Every structure is written in structure tokens, then in C-alpha cells.
Image (cartoon, rainbow, N blue to C red):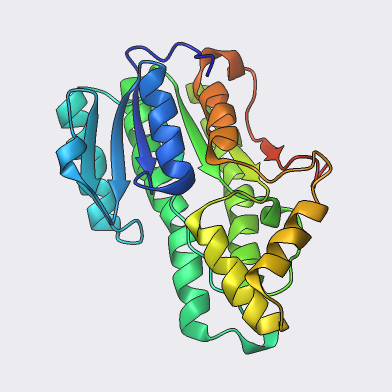
Amino acid sequence: MYCMDLTGKVAIVTGGAQGIGKAIVDAFLECGAKVAVADREINTENSNEQLVYFQTDVTKSDQVDKTVHKVVEHFGRLDILVNNAGISKMDYAIDIKEADWDLVMDVNAKGVYLYSQAVARILKQQGQGGKIINISSQAGKNGYRLMGSYVASKHAVLGFTKTMAIELAQDGINVNAVCPGIVETEMKHRERVIGGELRGLTAEDIRQEDFSQVPLGRTAKPQDIANVVVFLASTYSDYMTGQGINVTGGMTMH
């Protein structure tokens, strides 16, 4: 990939151990950044002077605060936050279980709020600006069958992104969101299986349906999303804030 220079920058990536998050971590490292991965599932064997792992539950404020301060202690500063951690539960809206709704909202929306708040405080104290990048979804702009709780959580992420962008602009902190379309990850495969069962279709039926909806003719790879995140983390995006950028192959155009 073509790298925008992130040398000397320190980033936290939540949910960075797999899928889109791992692609973002790899891209940041390639572009010279130092990265802290905050995830429930970690492999500390991969740690080195540029990469560290912290086991964190993004829904617990005490764990979030502890991780953020550990990152600053370890690397000496903080410049970039990527709120990537996310989950999905699938059911028809009238059948969504309260526990499932609460879990999705806690991870996808509350996790963004907690990490953004903790990191923004550090960035303000440092007084040198920074970047907060939230991974929303095209589900933050549209409604999707069987995805009621997920759709609600990703709309919440976009709303919070816009508010923080306004409030932190005077501190030189850019807050933007990326809205991926259909990305080939383990979570997407699981959604195809569950969604197929609920609709009386196979996972392959759903996969073909997915492909048919993308004007560019293919679904996304995690690297497609990481490329845009790198741009938002770089100085090239300094005049952008409060945006929800679609990376959907043309599926969503607003």
C-alpha cells in the first residue's frame, strides 16, 4: 500500500486483533505509527517496540481509563484513536431480545463514547491536537432487515461523532467516522449464516445477494477500510471533521 507518513504517532485501535481492526493495525505499523491494540482477545507474543496489546472490555469505564493511561505511560504520548470494536446480533425487529439490544448498544455505541471521552481528555491535555476515527457503517445511514440493534448503534456512532467534532474543533482534534459497506470478515460470514437461517436461505444465497448490490462489483476487503482510516489519521485530512465517509463500493451514496 502507499503509506502516508505516521512516523512518531501513537494510536489506539479497539478490536484490533481481527478483521477490519487488524487491517488497520497492520496499515498503521507499515506507515510508521506505534500502536496499542485494545481487545478482549489478545496475543501478547506479537508485542514489540512498535506494537503492544492490552486486554480490555470497551464497555467498562474503569478498564478503558486504565488502558488509555497505560498506553500513555508506555509510549509517552497519544495521537490517534480508532474506535473499531463492534458486534452484531440478528433478528427481526419485533423479536429482538432485550439482552441482545443492550449488548450491541453497549459495545458499539457506549464503547465509542467511553474511549472517545478518555482519549479526548488526554489529547486536550497534550495540547497538540489529534485524530479520533470511529468505525460506523453504512448501517449508520440506512435501515437493514434483521439488523435493528446494529443499525441503531451505528446511527448513534455517527451522531456522537458529529457532536464531538464540534466540541473538540477548537482543540485541533479531528473527529470523523468511516462507514464500511459489506466487508469480508468472520463476522460477515456469521451474519450470512444466521441471516440465511432466519430468511430460509443459504449463506451462499446471501453472499450472492451481497455481491449483486455493489455497483463496483465486489465486496470490500478489510484493507479497503484501513486505507481510508490511514488517510483520516494523517495530516492530509486536517481540514475534515464531523464526516461519515462511505467505503461501500457505491452501495451508499449519501
Above or below for 51 versus 164: above
Residue at 28% of width from left, 56% of height from top? Answer: 40
Q: Is residue 224 left or right of residue 124?
A: right
Residue at the (52%, 33%) spot, across then down: 226
Give me the residue at 74% from left, 53% from top.
141
Residue at 58% x, 41% y: name it.
221
Q: How many marks?
A: 0
Q: Quadrant of the C terminus?
A: top right
Q: Residue 156: x percent and y percent?
A: 60, 57
Residue 209 locus on image (x, y percent):
77, 61
* Quarter of image, res 8: top left
Looking at the image, residue 246 lies above or below residue 141: above
- From the viewer's perspective, is residue 10 above or below residue 194? above
User: Closest to the observer: 104 or 31?
Assistant: 31
Say if residue 92 shows up in the picture.
no
Res. 37 visible in picture: yes
Where is residue 12 drawn, in percent x and y? 34, 36
**x and y percentages locating residue 62 in the rendered image:** 23, 56
- Where is residue 77, by image quadrant? top left
Q: Nearer the viewer, residue 230 or 68?
A: 230
Question: Observer-nearest residue: 191 or 147?
Answer: 191
Residue 99 falls left or right of residue 11? right
| Residue in front for this viewpoint, 151 or 214 | 214
